[in-house]
Image (tube, rainbow, N blue to C red):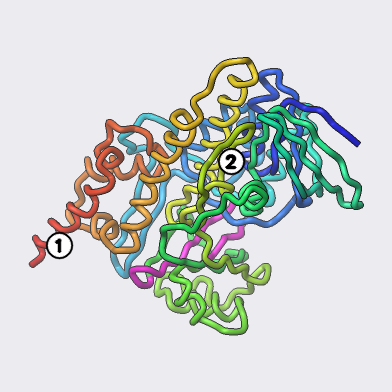
Amino acid sequence: MNEFVDVLVIGAGPSGCVSSCYLHNNGIKVKVVEKTKFPRLVVGESLIPRVMDHFEEAGLLDALQQMNFEKKSGARFIRGKEVCTFDFSQNYTKGWTWTWQVPRADFDQAMAKEVVRKGIDLAFETEVIAIEFNGKNSITTVKDKNGNLKKIHAKFVIDSSGYGRVLPRLLNLDSPSGLAPHSAIFTHIKDVNRPKNDIISFDIIQTEVWLWVIQFSNGNSSVGIVGSTEFINSLSTTSTTEALRKAILMSNHYKDRFGTLDFLFKPIKLENYSRTVKKMYGDGFALTGNSTEFLDPVFSSGVAFATESGMLAAKLALKELSGETVDWENDYSHYMQQGIETFRTYVEEWYTGNLQTLFFHQPENPEVKKKICSVLAGYVWDKSNPFVKKHKNIIKNMAHMLNMDKK
């Protein structure tokens, strides 16, 4: 069986939903294929404000607002008795000042339902098994849950397959990440001891080891441990449940709150999660979201890069389909890499401890904090912010100066 569309989108996560909705809203015939059946459990439950721009532009915001997800107006970082809280209303860059914390199973399903409601053809439990390109045109072979094969002819393909990394695998585009190997273990807990007005928190157990607590509006919280792969593996050789339990008990801030509570599902381990690719586009296709790069969960940047790249890829694909010449290297790859490299610096300097030095220094510098807050909110393309423009050196240099002042 053959099917003909303008654009094939692989994956129905945030990136795929944003790109497919934008294209559909602009009169493009789109087909979305998703390997799994929703609802599904995935990581990436804490969003950052930049994503709200994309949901609004794609026409998904109203449907998501109806879900009454937990509102996220900032984030708290804890190191022993030291606390640093960022308030997104205090951003240097003008933009959204809040976002959500979401059980991803519910969040992704709400987006997918809206995609279908808009009239977009979305096929669940449909796996891409092969793809051929003839110039910019492609023929993608997919298999449904019953084993039936179909060939989808498309003028452009957007790979939003996330951790499935469909085109990187089929086209040999995977590349080793330059980040040190880190892993995570997480679960959900019925948060019966949650205090009022609690906010998302990152509890630093060691410089390279931290615990996340993400509250949901349904009364549950996501709890996870992140550290070097060697450290995570040392927690238990047999059980993710034992490993996460040990990690929680290492947290002076959270051991009493969560130490004896049951886990709602067996903790999931994500090992050596950082990924990258040799290139982000090619003739007739673009890679978006985790299909291209995944850095680290510490600043919740994953969904933001997914929706940023999904929206941008859709806009450029629309131009190309309209007969315009698109400079994918500068307008897509270079642009996305600028934001990724900024966040990469923040991830690297988090694990060196330099960024933590800035976070917890007293007295606080309000102007510095505003500029860092804008980065944490996802506004990593604003080069008027010196903490974006000079990201490669500014954190390291400031931390060195602060450490010298202590001596």
Residue under the point 32% across and 66% down: 79
Marks 2 and 1 in Cβ contact (< 8 Å): no
In depth, the one of 298 and 123 nearer the eye is 123
Q: Earlier in the sequence, mark 2 or mark 1?
A: 2
Query: Of helix, strand and loop, which one carries label 1?
Result: helix
Magenta-drawn segment: 205-224
* Percent x, y of residue 356: 29, 60
**Residue count near mark 1 (Cα–Cα under 10 Å), binned few <14, some 14–19, many ≥20:** some
Q: Magenta stretch: residue 308 in it?
A: no
Q: Which residue is labeled 2 in the image?
A: 287
210 in the magenta segment: yes
Q: Callout 2: 10 Å neighbours few (<14), some, many (20+)?
A: many
Closer to us: 73 or 347: 347
Q: Give the percent coordinates (x, y) of residue 199.
A: 45, 54
Q: Quadrant of the C terminus?
A: bottom left
User: Which residue is tagged 1?
Assistant: 403
Q: Is residue 114 left or right of residue 293?
A: right
Which secondary structure is most common in the magenta stretch?
strand
Label 1 is placed on what type of residue? Answer: Asn
Which image quadrant for residue 318?
Answer: top right
Residue 155 shows in this picture? yes
Query: Alpha carbon of mark 2 to alpha carbon of mark 1: how far?
Result: 41 Å
- Left or right of 368 on screen, residue 107: right
> At numbered mark 2, what does the secondary structure look like: helix, strand or loop?
strand
The residue under the point 60% across, 28% down is 314
